[in-house]
Image (tube, rainbow, N blue to C red):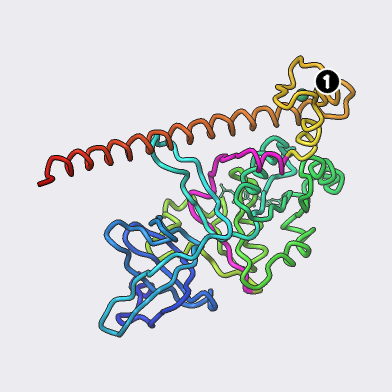
């Protein structure tokens, strides 16, 4: 393990750096223009937060930070966070906490689903919504193509629920379909792979990387944690691309919002826009374009149910975050009122 310790006097890093791992008290960073460089540890302020515009936020893997070190005797510190181009978020369970940013500045979200057993279309729609919400470009990858007779036909079926998204079928043992995915690994492109356990995320990423960068299902029976304290979570791949792999991303749930749902379900959104009433609930209202499409068969019942379910989740999350905001607003008022009364009391 000693060989993995950083050198006693680490290389000086200043200027824009990418976070390759974020821990409670410190960041591991590499220069933004040399993502394959050996990571350097940079301490954080006591609160673990970093200035971003007028606020302070917890930094996360993938973040671009500005590191300053006036001279060799002063430890390097993080001066500020660059605004995030994209953010993969998880809705945290706490009542007061905001959605947790699992990774920042991800460019491509690989939505990984197996062809054998049959792909779960609802899960693909769910993960596409998560990907759209992040601001990154989703790409669907259907694995285990080598195990089914008609991977192209199955991919066409999935493409029917993944509007505006590239869908690729791949079989890693035979190399089937891997070439078009390699084309995604341009310089500086950051990817994540999301999907259910056993879908083949690690196998796929390792095949693209040409070496083992993600531990596969078989290799983790040894009881050793994959994540040691010096383990980077932003891993260089071939072609200058990087993979973001954290324990949290593997099992990420849904954070939906109305815009992300409209992107995933552009067909249903277009129908809903044609309903007679703007607040149509698509139940029994006259002039409901969604119900008409369901009845004529133009809209698939499974897809409609999937949309309803995710829309309900999104609405629930929106209400919950409204409740949080209201609670925070009340707390701010209480503080302000208390300070006002204190000021009045201490006035000469
Ligand atoms: N035949 C075939 N098997 C595959 C393919 N991709 C993955 N597998 C197998 O599926 C199993 C699960 O693959 P993993 O890559 O570990 O799956 P994962 O999505 O990373 O799973 P977690 O680490 O649990 O999230 C392994 O036994 C792989 O060998 C494929 O394209 N074809
Ligand atoms: Zn309607």
* Chain part drawn in magenta: 240-264
Residue 210 x %, y %: 64, 68
Instruction: Give SS at disc 1.
Output: loop
At x 36%, y 71%, the residue is: 41
Which residue appears at 39% of the width and 62% of the height? 51
Task: Assign the N terminus to one quadrant of the image.
Answer: bottom left
Q: Relative to residue 93, is residue 48 depicted above or below?
A: below
Percent across and percent down for residue 196 are 61, 43
Residue 159 falls within the magenta-colored stretch: no
In the rendered image of this protein, does residue 326 appear above or below residue 209?
Answer: above
Image height of 153 relative to 103, above or below: above
Question: Is residue 71 rendered to the left or right of residue 255?
Answer: left
Q: Position of residue 231 (x, y in %)?
A: 43, 64
Q: Is mark 1 within 8 Å of ligand 2?
A: yes
Q: Which residue is mark 1?
A: 287
Residue sitting farthest toward the right:
296
Local crowd at mark 1 within 10 Å, few (<14), some, or many (≥20)? some
Nearest the viewer among 67 and 161 is: 67
Residue 181 percent coordinates (x, y): 74, 62
Residue at the spot 76% in from the left edge and 28% down from the top edge: 302
Identity of the residue furthest to the bottom in this view: 72
């Amino acid at each position: 393990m000693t060989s993995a310790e950083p050198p006693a006097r680490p290389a000086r890093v200043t200027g824009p750096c990418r976070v390759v791992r974020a821990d409670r008290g410190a960041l591991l960073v590499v220069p933004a223009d040399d993502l394959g460089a050996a990571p350097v540890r940079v301490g954080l302020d006591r609160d673990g937060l970093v200035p971003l515009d007028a606020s302070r936020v917890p930094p996360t893997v993938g973040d671009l930070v500005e590191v300053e070190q006036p001279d060799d005797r002063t430890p390097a510190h993080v001066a500020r966070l660059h605004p995030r181009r994209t953010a993969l978020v998880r809705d945290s369970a706490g009542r007061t906490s905001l959605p947790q940013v699992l990774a920042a500045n991800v460019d491509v979200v690989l939505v990984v689903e197996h062809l054998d057993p049959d792909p779960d279309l609802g899960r693909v729609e769910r993960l596409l919504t998560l990907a759209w919400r992040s601001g990154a470009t989703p790409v669907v990858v259907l694995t285990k193509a080598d195990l089914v007779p008609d991977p192209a036909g199955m991919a066409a079926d999935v493409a029917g629920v993944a509007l505006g998204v590239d869908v690729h079928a791949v079989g890693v043992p035979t190399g089937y379909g891997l070439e078009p995915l390699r084309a995604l690994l341009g310089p500086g492109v950051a990817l994540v792979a999301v999907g259910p356990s056993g879908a083949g995320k690690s196998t796929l990423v390792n095949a693209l990387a040409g070496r083992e960068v993600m531990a596969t299902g078989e290799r983790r029976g040894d009881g050793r944690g994959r994540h040691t304290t010096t383990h980077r979570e932003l891993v260089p791949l071939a072609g200058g691309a990087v993979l973001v792999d954290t324990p949290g991303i593997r099992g990420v749930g849904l954070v939906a919002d109305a815009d992300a749902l409209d992107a995933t379900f552009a067909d249903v959104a277009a129908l809903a826009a044609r309903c007679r009433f703007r607040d149509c609930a698509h139940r029994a209202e006259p002039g409901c374009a969604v119900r008409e499409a369901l009845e004529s068969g133009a809209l698939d019942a499974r897809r409609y149910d999937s949309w309803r379910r995710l829309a309900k989740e999104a609405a629930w999350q929106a209400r919950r975050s409204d409740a949080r905001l209201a609670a925070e607003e009340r707390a701010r008022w209480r503080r302000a009122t208390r300070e006002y009364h204190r000021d009045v009391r201490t006035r000469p």
